Image: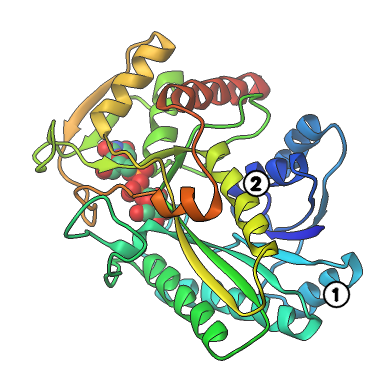
């Protein structure tokens, strides 16, 4: 079964391409390389031992999307591609809306036109905002997110649900990702942030390798065990595998199906716990200091994965130790490749 993977050269997309191939699917990447690198294709080739099929196109280009789907006989789509501000001091809401909602509408349009039935959509735990109770389940009310990015995820979920409610012959799963970290254990692919990373783990690994002088922990006066934020950090390979489980579940469903699943570990860890695990597993000391809170940070969130386990038959296999070890291996590999 041929699967179009929009944003397949990105961090989560590339790991999903590997897991799809391992599970016997044929992924076809469409990526505009706005926030990804061509070197990812080399890494994928090393892991898969053959070239991966890709198109350098924007999935907001509806003509290209349609042509590729027709030419490749695409039977399912995993829609990762989304705009995220990189190195911009001011977020541009219209850019988010145009790109993220626009591309989702175009994917749906092409699927309906060509009779492609299966869609897995990348949503995010950001749709929960700061929940009143944790762990969050899929029924936890979504809160208006504090960012245009978060809002586009909420709106896209609604668009997908409405498309199904209207009776269209599609089968759709939205996956709400928690915080993906780590890298492929082969260290051939991983996260490639542009500029100064805003995510915790790439900032940790770049500090450990000497690209950044020190890590600032954004606040230690939160109402948590050690005062730092709590997140649900999931190994990117486990997260990638959830897409295979989602496609398998879709295959057992009748047309006109919509469901939403949390993709996390079911556990929360504080920022300091991540730092300590990183130091312990990789036997090094990290230069860090406590700084002020980062505006907009949610105090604590982690997800219940009961529904994902029961309905999708998906379960995490990796540990936090695996994640921080693989993240560090990858950072060392990037450094080696630069030399
Ligand atoms: O230099 C840093 C970077 C991060 N953090 C903390 O580390 C935690 C995780 O931060 P980060 O890696 O930036 O993830 P989140 O802010 O949780 O955002 C992630 O999770 C969101 C869903 O809630 C997604 O929408 C985003 O795309 C994704 O980056 C937070 O408590 C941060 O305050 C630091 O202390 N120092």
* In the displayed structure image, the side of residue 127 where residue 310 appears, left or right: right
Crowdedness of circle 2 by 10 Å Cα count: few (<14), some, many (20+)?
A: many
Name the residue that disc number 2 marks: 16
Which label sits on residue 5?
none
Which residue occupies the foreground of this view, 202 or 75?
75
Q: Secondary structure at mark 1?
A: helix
**At 85% across and 74% down in the image, what residue appears?**
67
Which residue occupies the foreground of this view, 296 or 222?
222
Q: Position of residue 169 (x, y in %)?
A: 68, 83
Above or below, 202 relative to 110? above
Tag in front: 1 or 2: 2
Question: Would you identify the image quadrant in which residue 213 lies?
Answer: top left
Q: Position of residue 27 (x, y in %)?
A: 78, 53
Q: Secondary structure at mark 2?
A: helix
* Colouring mode (rainbow / by chain / secondary structure / one colour): rainbow
Labels in figure, total: 2
**Residue furthest right as drawn:** 71
Question: Would you identify the image quadrant in which residue 205 lies?
Answer: top left
**Residue furthest bottom as drawn:** 166
Q: Position of residue 204 (x, y in %)?
A: 38, 28
Q: Earlier in the sequence, mark 1 or mark 2?
A: 2
**At 72% across and 47% down in the image, what residue appears?**
20
Q: Position of residue 332 (x, y in %)?
A: 56, 19
Q: Quadrant of the N terminus?
A: bottom right
Which residue occupies the foreground of this view, 1 or 84?
1
**At 47% across and 47% down in the image, what residue appears?**
309
Q: Quadrant of the C terminus?
A: top right
Name the residue that disc number 1 marks: 67
């Amino acid at each position: 079964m041929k699967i179009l993977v929009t944003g397949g050269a990105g961090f989560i997309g590339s790991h999903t391409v590997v897991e799809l191939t391992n599970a016997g699917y044929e992924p076809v990447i469409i990526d505009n390389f706005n926030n990804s690198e061509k070197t990812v294709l080399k890494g994928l080739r090393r892991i898969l031992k053959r070239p991966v099929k890709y198109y350098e196109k924007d999935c907001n280009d509806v003509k290209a999307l349609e042509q590729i789907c027709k030419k490749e006989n695409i039977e399912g789509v995993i829609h990762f591609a989304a705009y995220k501000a990189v190195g911009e001091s001011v977020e541009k809401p219209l850019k988010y809306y145009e790109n993220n909602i626009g591309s989702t509408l175009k994917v749906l349009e092409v699927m309906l036109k060509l009779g492609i039935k299966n869609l897995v959509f990348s949503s995010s735990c950001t749709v929960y905002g700061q929940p009143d109770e944790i762990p969050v389940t899929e029924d936890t009310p979504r809160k208006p997110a504090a960012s245009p990015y978060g809002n586009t995820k909420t709106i896209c979920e609604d668009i997908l649900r409405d498309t199904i409610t209207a009776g269209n012959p599609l089968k759709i799963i939205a996956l709400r990702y928690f915080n993906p970290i780590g890298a492929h254990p082969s260290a051939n692919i991983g996260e490639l942030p542009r500029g100064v990373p805003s995510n915790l783990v790439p900032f940790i690994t770049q500090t450990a390798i000497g690209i950044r002088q020190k890590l600032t922990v954004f606040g230690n006066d939160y109402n948590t065990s050690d005062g730092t934020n709590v997140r649900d950090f999931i190994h990117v390979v486990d997260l990638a595998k959830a897409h295979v489980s989602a496609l398998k579940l879709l295959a057992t469903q009748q047309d006109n199906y919509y469901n939403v699943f949390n993709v996390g570990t079911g556990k929360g860890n504080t920022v300091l716990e991540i730092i300590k695990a990183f130091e312990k597993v990789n036997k090094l000391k990290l230069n860090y200091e406590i700084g002020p809170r980062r505006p907009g940070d949610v105090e604590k969130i982690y997800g219940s994965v009961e529904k994902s386990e029961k309905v999708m038959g998906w379960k995490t296999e990796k540990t936090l130790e695996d994640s921080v070890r693989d993240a560090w291996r990858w950072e060392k590999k990037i450094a080696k490749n630069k030399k």
